[in-house]
Image (tube, rainbow, N blue to C red):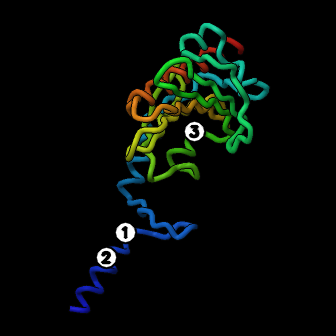
Amino acid sequence: MRIIGGAVAAVALAGCSAGTDGTPYPVETAATAASQSAKAAQLPQRPADLPLDGVHLCEVFPQVQLDALKITSAPREAAAPADGPTCVFDADGAEPVHSYHVRAVPADLGEWITGARKKNSMTTEPKTIGGYPALTNYRADGDPADCETLVGVAKGQTLAVQTFAITRGKLTQPQLCDMAVHAADLALQSLKARN
């Protein structure tokens, strides 16, 4: 019985590895790696570079787009951006209250598929927005809180638009992702108009 119990424990532990904090996470299988490569293959080539250097993110949406997104507060720069310059746009005039965080991330889009920014706990889906390669990135489990759309706008530069549900329980995961995609599309239109 001890041999069988030990074998079962060894098999159970074989599917996990320890992360830096000692938290177990699933080991990426060959099938998972193949599906990630398939995702990368679905992305279109970037039609032209739209560099984010010198772009003031709080000015990325003209007034007509701010109205379309129901932004009611003045855009503000994030106090301590962790992942590149960030501007926060709040839609807090009516329920459900939500917020958009627009970031200029110094990384290639592929980093979220096969690179250092890929997380097994996140669902990543390939998209095309305005002809540009893009991804939606969200946590499928639990209460929907946010969804991020990432657009590969230039080599080594990704435009990230993340929609946060401030009023909890009112927006579904698909709604949050649709909102993030829509806002990213508007931001991309604005970037195209500037170049």
Question: What percent of the width, then of the height, locates residue 100?
Answer: 58, 28
Which residue sits at x=41%, y=68%? 16
User: How far apart in space, not on screen, are marks 3 and 1 (Cα)?
Assistant: 28 Å
- Labelled pair 1, 2 in contact (Cβ < 8 Å): yes
Q: Which of the 4 image quarters holds residue 83?
A: top right
Dot 3 amino acid type: Leu
Judging by the rendered image, the residue that carries numbered circle 2 is 11
Q: Which residue is mark 1?
A: 15
The correct choice, above or below, for 121 with respect to 135 in the image is below
CA separation, marks 1 and 2? 7 Å
What mark, if any, has residue 109 been given in the picture? Answer: 3
Q: Secondary structure at mark 1?
A: loop
Of badges 2 and 3, the one in the foreground is: 2
Q: Is residue 156 left or right of residue 65?
A: right
Q: Is residue 39 above or below residue 30?
A: above
Report whether 20 appears left or right of 125.
Answer: right
Q: What's under tag 2, amino acid-wise? A: Val
- Identity of the residue drawn at 48% across and 35% down: 147
Q: CA distance from mark 2 to mark 3?
A: 35 Å
Q: Above or below — where is 26 with respect to 85?
A: below
Q: Residues within 10 Å of mark 2 (few under 14, many from 20)?
A: few
Left or right of 183? Residue 75 is right
- Quarter of the image with the N terminus in it: bottom left
